Image (cartoon, rainbow, N blue to C red):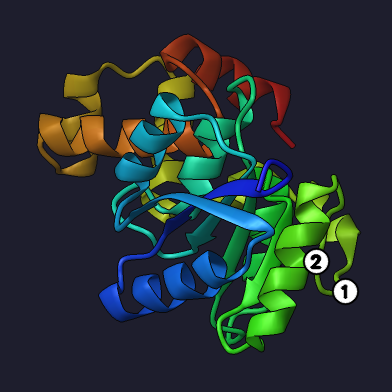
Amino acid sequence: MSDSRSLIIADPNTIMLQALSDLFERDKRFSLVATTKTAEGFLESCLRVPVDIGIVDWSIPQLGAERLLGILRDRPNAPRIIVYASGGDPDVPRRALAAGAAAFCTRDAPEQQLLDVALSVATGRMVFPYMDVRSLKRDPRETLTEREKAMLTALAKGRTNNELAAELGISINTVKFHLRNLYEKLNLRNRSQAIAFFYANEA
């Protein structure tokens, strides 16, 4: 057991969480440290007990796997993450890779395939279905909603939050909500960085 790979599993579905737990507990090559139904619970578990591997459902509440990966990417000794989801959206593997995942596996994959992927990840490999990696370089502005794009343009014109609320016909709290999403999607910290980003990427 000394050579077993430690892991945490995160899935909002109780039945799926139990099935995955049983799968990895039966395999002596792995040591299941914790299970959780939320991204926050996953983060807390990682902080308490460092682990080798994380298996995370793409739709994990409340942060979501994409945001969770972004947080873990900057942490030392973070687990290598395997994202799994239904195979219906071909964009999910690309987004998972771009966010920092080590592997992607579909929900309907055979049990043995998930075990094999976990072992590969534990040895430092990355496992993804074929994809055109050129798409990873897409403009981050493509992730913004029309409202967020309008706010970015208005910010570049020097608008205050009050002016943004009046101009867009929304409340101050809604302005703050959209700005927070805008900053997260573009990996920015504040208004000044947003303005700089706008002019640096202006066509």
What residue is rendered at 53% in x and 30% in y? Answer: 50
Q: Is residue 171 left or right of residue 95?
A: left
Left-right relation of 94 to 130: left
User: On the image, which quarter does residue 30 sit in?
Assistant: bottom right
The amino acid beneath tag 2 is Phe
The C terminus, quarter of image: top right
**49 w.r.t. 100: above or below:** above
Nearer to us in this view, 113 or 28: 28
Residue at the image point whose x is 14% and y is 42% from the top: 170
Q: Is residue 144 visible?
A: no
- For mark 1, what is the residue? 130
Of residue 183 and residue 83, the one placed in the foreground of this image is 83
Q: Is residue 60 left or right of residue 78?
A: left
Pick whichever, 197 or 57, lies toward us: 57
Tell me if I can see residue 46 in this picture: yes
Q: Which residue is mark 2?
A: 128
Q: How many marks?
A: 2
| Dot 1: element | loop
In the visual, does 202 lie left or right of 188? right
Q: Label 2: few (<14), some or many (≥20) within 10 Å?
A: some
Viewer-nearest residue: 13 or 68: 13
The amino acid at mark 1 is Tyr
Asked if disc 2 and disc 1 are in contact, CB closer than 8 Å, the reply is yes
Work out how far the residue at label 2 is from the one at label 1, CA to CA, in angstroms.
6 Å
Residue 144 image point, x, y percent: 50, 49
> How would you rate the neighbour count of disc 1 (Cα within 10 Å): few for under 14, some for 14-19, many for 20 or more?
few
Q: Secondary structure at mark 2?
A: loop
Q: Residue furthest front?
A: 1
